[in-house]
Image (spheres, helix red, strand yellow):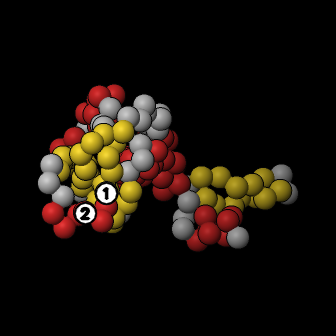
Amino acid sequence: KLVYKLKTDGLIKENQENNKKVLSLTQKGARVLSLLKESKCEPLPPLRYTKEQGEKLIIIAFDIPEKDARKRAWLRSALKNLGFKMIQKSFWVGKTKIPKSFLEDLYKLKLINFVEILEISKTGSLKQLQ
C-alpha cells in the first residue's frame, strides 16, 4: 500500500533493470525527502524541566504558525510535563513556576513572540481551577 501511495503521489517510479523491478526517487520525491531532512535537522530541547509549585495561577496561551507545528507539539508536551492543564489546545493553566531554562528554550526556538504567559493574582471566575 505504501509503495502504491508513493507511486501515485509521484514520489517514486518503477524501472526495469536486468529483468528486475527497481524503485527510484523522482525529482519530486527528492525535493520532498530534502525538505523532510531539513525539518529533522533542528533538534528540539528536552522536555524535562525542574517543577516547582507556585502560589499563583499561571495562564499560558499561544498561537504558533502551522509551519512550526513540530515546535508547537514540543511546547504542548513541555507544558504537560511541567504540570499545566490544557483548557484548549493553545490555552494552558497551572500553578507551576516557569523555569528560566524553559523561557530560554522558547527564545532559542524563536517561539517567544507567539507565547503569552500571564500570572493571575486574583482568580475571579477561575476559582474552580485552584
Residue at horizontal 48%, vertical 56%? 28
Outermost residue to the right:
19
Element type where label 1 sits in the image: loop
Q: Identify the residue position indicated by label 2 in the image.
A: 127
Answer with left or right where residue 74 lies relative to residue 7. Answer: left
Residue at horizontal 32%, vertical 32%? 99
> Residue 31 appears at what percent x and percent y?
46, 50
Q: How far apart are marks 1 and 2 (CA)?
A: 6 Å
Amino acid, disc 1? Gln
Amino acid, disc 2? Lys
**Are dots 1 and 2 in contact, CB under 8 Å?**
yes
Residue at horizontal 54%, vertical 65%? 10
Q: In which quarter of the image is residue 16?
A: bottom right
Residue at horizontal 31%, vertical 57%? 130
Viewer-side residue, 58 vs 100 = 58
> Residue 66 appears at what percent x and percent y?
32, 58
Can residue 25 be seen here? yes
- Label number found at residue 130: 1
Q: Quadrant of the N terminus?
A: bottom right
Q: Dot 1, crowdedness within 10 Å: few (<14), some or many (≥20)?
A: few
> Residue 33 appears at what percent x and percent y?
52, 48
Q: Dot 2, crowdedness within 10 Å: few (<14), some or many (≥20)?
A: few
Can residue 68 be seen here? no
Answer with left or right where residue 83 lies relative to residue 8. Answer: left
- Label number found at residue 11: none
Is 123 located above or below residue 71 in the figure? Answer: below
Is 42 located above or below residue 21 in the figure? Answer: above
Element type where label 2 sits in the image: helix
> Residue 5 appears at what percent x and percent y?
62, 69
Viewer-side residue, 3 vs 45 = 45
